[in-house]
Image (tube, grey):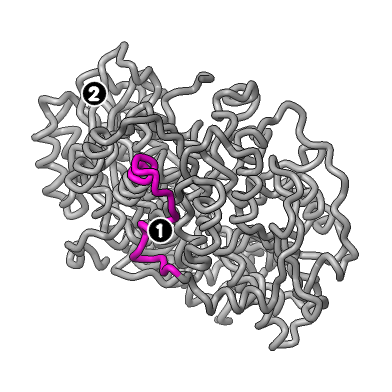
Amino acid sequence: MTSVVLLDHGSGGRASRRLIREVFMRHLSNPVLDTMDDAAHLELSGSLAMSTDSFTVDPPEFPGGDIGSLAVHGTVNDVAMLGARPRYLSCAFILEEGLPLDLLERIVRSMGQAARAAGVWVVTGDTKVVPRGAADKVFITTTGIGEILADPAPAGSRAAAGDAVLLSGTVGDHGLTILSRRAGLALDGPLASDSAPLHVMAASLATEVGDIHVLRDPTRGGLATTLNEIAEQSGVACEIREEAIPVRSCVASGCAVLGLDPLYLANEGKLLCILPEAKAAGALAVMRRSPYGAEAAVIGRILAPGDKAGAGRVILITRPGGRRLLGMLEGEQLPRIC
Amino acid sequence: MRERGKAVENRLPESLAFADPALCRPLLDRLRRDLDRPLRFMEVCGTHTVAIFRSGLRSLLPKEIVHLSGPGCPVCVTHDREIAACLALAGREGTLLATFGDLMRVPGPGGASLKTAKAQGAEVEVVYSPLDALRLARQRPDRAVIFLGVGFETTAPAVAAAVIMARGEGLRNFSVLSLHKLVPPALETLLADGAPDIDAFLLPGHVSTILGLAPYRFLAERHGKPGVVGGFEPADILQALLLLLDMLRTGKTAVRNQYTRAVAPEGNPRAREILFSVFEPADALWRGLGEIPASGLVLREQYGDLDARRLFDLELPPGAGIPGCRCGDVLRGRLSPPGCPLFGSVCTPSAPVGPCMVSAEGGCAAFFTYSEQREGT
């Protein structure tokens, strides 16, 4: 095989079939995908959760993961946030002409490993090749489907006064890793993406603890944005204690240098769990049992209606003991000028 | 599969250590105890603006201590006519503009911005450092790469270094549009009418790493206003406020240094040497403050071939200003952001009318983002 992706690989002819067989089938194989039919024949029952996400990340490989594992974890986690067990994924690739085949193979292999670890099958897929410049190396879209385990399912609109807000671990790791790689900045410390599957933690919360009001993974926009979305959807005010939010030391110092706030940086292996205060200790124990939840913490609470903070707002009690809004940012955070 | 968990460091980074309540509380208590007069202090650094809001210090300070944001946000003080010049360059055939991200969204004449220019086909790249702009010039010999030099004394030495490197390499397609500004002349202008509303200045930590203390001495010597160069963590700011209050109480006004771990009294002479080998002071336009003598930096004659103004024969286009926008008054500390009739209604971070709402370090954006108070005072 040639060592880079050619437009031929997307033609539907022999080159396409070779690529599918030698790269995709080799790493993603399972009984459903292997039938090579036009559609996947699935066995599912009950209430279902479905989610889709497109992944475009520059660079495609980064400390802690790559676009392949990220495309699996991202969608698996979104499905899991409905208190569901993720079962199947579809994946569509858009490849840029000239993409090194060994890079593609590493990405697909990593995707296969991540899918096996998450207990999901990639059951259908598609590949297109676009001319050089029409895409940035590789774009992946995954769609996931899973069976809902909790009744009622957690939802962003269910946060209620008296609930505790729990976070499964440190924030900002993924966002700062990508940003520093992209900008070619060498930051100190063991900086790595936190990309990880959270379906087991989410399922344990839903089935062992129960009465989970909200589960959500604070990806793009970070913890602050996700909290604001929940406060708005639920029509409640939320109070967060800054000192309770776990932030890795290298992330805190990297952010301080660049003038960034880790609360607005993306995470790919963390979840927020909002549930009645009385259940917080049990939920915390379940989260900490997970390999991805060792640093889980209670970070705040949902305030009573009529609190001066006002519905839809998130208040941060800062480290020195001050009080301020934890608002949403307009766009991407930018490193400071001076 | 992944490296994780093993290497969580125990050392608290400086940014967290200086926010420690055990450190901040006694400083606050002393400030409350010693406060025997109103203290209206102005900071002139966007990083201070954000730090004071973000740390929640505003909610902790006694109400007699009033925080004013001065002309310290580099994007905010960039004049309409300078933005218009950037847009004019973006429209020239064959140019590629390299800019810090904040400048992208600043509205110029008719609401156009570099962002909208880019969407319409102009080549504009966001860079993190002037060295990135040099790299772009090497990669794109077919384009005239123009670095938009915005910022104060902190940023300018690195731009000067890039200019020297470009000269050394003989890069023919690189130039700089210098819109740099100098902090002390702006303070001088603010004090022209005696600035009765400002009791003291919190001086910029980053800028002072380059300048040292000497350029601010006139604040105390000629105007009787105390100034303290302060760091950016809550304990730094509280300590600087204590020093300011102490000077006001004893009547011994001076310019002092709280940020000793970063700022040497003499600043960084080497950086200044590089800066002034490439640039020389010139009159400059400031939003809100107008034209201030010797408050900007232009490339020296011998670097004329790297000066975008000369290369593109660029005149600053006339500016009409932004109707209703009171960023100028905000930058002078005369108006608190919610006092502007546009604040929070017509002008928000999603649809900014003026630059103080565009830049994350702008006084209006910081107020909107962090303050629970949204109505005028």
* Residue A196 spot, x, y in % from top left: 30, 54
Q: Which residue is mark 1?
A: A176
Indicate which label's residue lies in the foreground, 2 or 1.
Answer: 1
* Residue A115 spot, x, y in % from top left: 33, 56
Work out which residue is located at the far front of the displayed protein and give it: B251
State left or right for residue B107 relative to residue B23. right
Q: Quadrant of the N terminus of chain A?
A: bottom right
Q: B12 above or below A204?
A: below
- When asked about the image quadrant of residue A4, the answer is bottom right
Q: Disc 2 versus disc 1: distance between alpha carbons?
A: 36 Å
Three-letter code for the amino acid on which mark 2 is drawn: Asp
Three-letter code for the amino acid on which mark 1 is drawn: Leu
Is residue B263 on the magenta stretch?
yes
- Residue B117 visible somewhere in the drawing: yes
* Residue A278 spot, x, y in % from top left: 10, 25
**Mark 2 Cα-neighbour bin, 10 Å: few <14, some 14–19, many ≥20:** few
**Mark 1 Cα-neighbour bin, 10 Å: few <14, some 14–19, many ≥20:** many
Q: Which residues are magenta?
A: B245-265
Res. A151 mark: 2
The answer for which chain carries disc 2 is A
Q: Which SS class for mark 2? A: loop
Along the line of sight, the residue nearer the viewer: A111 or A167: A167
